[in-house]
């Protein structure tokens, strides 16, 4: 996906990028490649692939959820900032918190946010399990998202404790989302949420399958969740 395709395909979806926003994406790409030489941020470094598989792919969440109003967003295990930083560039009104367990990635994200001139962004070096038990963050977010982090039964336990009752959890998945959903139903029920809808589509150009799940938090998550670091992965709620 070249930049012209990136601009026009987003415009078709009602996202009209300003020169400042386009410059931010340029800077993002440059810094991603620069820092990737020092630390492992991504296996994707060609410009056209980054614009498609990282930037555009991250923004697809906004095709199905209204991000135009001011709201709080938490991105769990964002790695090099996906999906929340591309979404923040497109929707500056978002208040974004990223939690990641690797300090080096947090250092990159702090530098990136400074270079892009982003405001209302916060980066926390922590495991999702301990972050979700911290009263400063627990059930504080309108929207929680994660992309390519873990299967749904595990991911729900890491993310749903952060969502306000009445808020939304948006896992972004590649193929096999229906199978994950089947296994993840019990976890959603235990954690106080229900599946609202699943949006399936093909990523343009390469035509690989994508699924965006919209999960509503209906009541408070029991206090025992998330369990201790490592437990959700070893003993998923299935």
Image (cartoon, grey):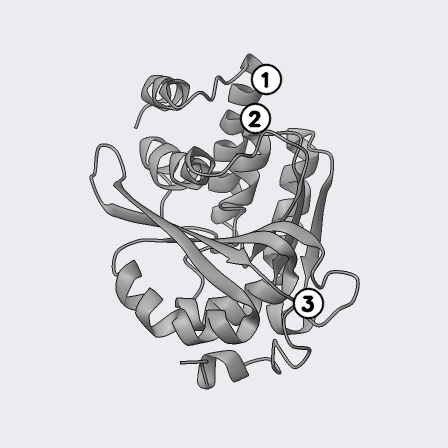
Q: Is 154 rendered above or below residue 56?
A: below
Q: Position of residue 60 (x, y in %)?
A: 40, 37
* Spatial separation of the CA atoms under disc 2 and disc 3: 29 Å
Disc 2 designates what residue?
Answer: 24
Residue farthest to the right?
136
Question: Could one spot residue 101 in this view of the protein?
Answer: no
Based on the displayed image, in which of its 4 quarters is residue 221 positioned? bottom right
Cα distance in 3D space between marks 2 and 1: 6 Å
Q: Position of residue 230 (x, y in %)?
A: 54, 81
Q: Which residue is mark 3?
A: 131
Residue 63 in the image: above or below residue 197: above
The crowd level at tag 2 (other Cα within 10 Å; few <14, some 14-19, many 20+) is: many
The residue lying toward the viewer, choosing from 72 and 19, is 72
Q: Residues within 10 Å of mark 3 (few under 14, many from 20)?
A: many
Report the quarter where the N terminus lies.
Answer: top left
Dividing the picture into quadrants, the one containing residue 129 is bottom right
Query: Which numbered disc, 2 or 3, marks the residue closer to the eye?
Result: 3
Residue with the mark numbered 1: 20
Q: Outermost residue, front direction? A: 218
């Amino acid at each position: 996906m070249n930049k012209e395709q990136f601009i026009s395909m987003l415009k078709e979806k009602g996202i009209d990028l300003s020169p400042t926003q386009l410059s931010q994406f340029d800077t993002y790409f440059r810094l991603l490649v620069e820092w990737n030489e020092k630390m492992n941020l991504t296996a994707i470094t060609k410009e056209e692939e980054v614009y498609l598989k990282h930037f555009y792919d991250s923004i697809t969440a906004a095709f199905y959820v209204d991000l135009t109003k001011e709201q709080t967003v938490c991105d769990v295990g964002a790695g090099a900032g996906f999906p929340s930083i591309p979404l923040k560039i497109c929707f500056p009104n978002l208040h974004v918190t990223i939690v990641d367990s690797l300090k080096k990635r947090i250092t990159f994200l702090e530098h990136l946010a400074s270079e892009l001139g982003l405001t209302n962004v916060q980066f926390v070096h922590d495991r999702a399990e301990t972050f979700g038990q911290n009263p400063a963050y627990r059930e504080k977010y309108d929207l929680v998202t994660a992309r390519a982090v873990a299967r749904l039964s595990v991911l729900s336990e890491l993310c749903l404790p952060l969502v306000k009752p009445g808020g939304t959890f948006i896992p972004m998945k590649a193929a096999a989302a229906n199978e994950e959903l089947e296994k993840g139903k019990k976890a959603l029920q235990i954690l106080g949420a229900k599946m609202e809808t699943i949006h399936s589509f093909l990523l343009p150009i390469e035509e690989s399958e994508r699924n965006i799940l919209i999960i509503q938090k209906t009541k408070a998550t029991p206090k025992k969740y998330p369990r201790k670091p490592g437990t959700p992965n070893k003993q998923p709620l299935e």
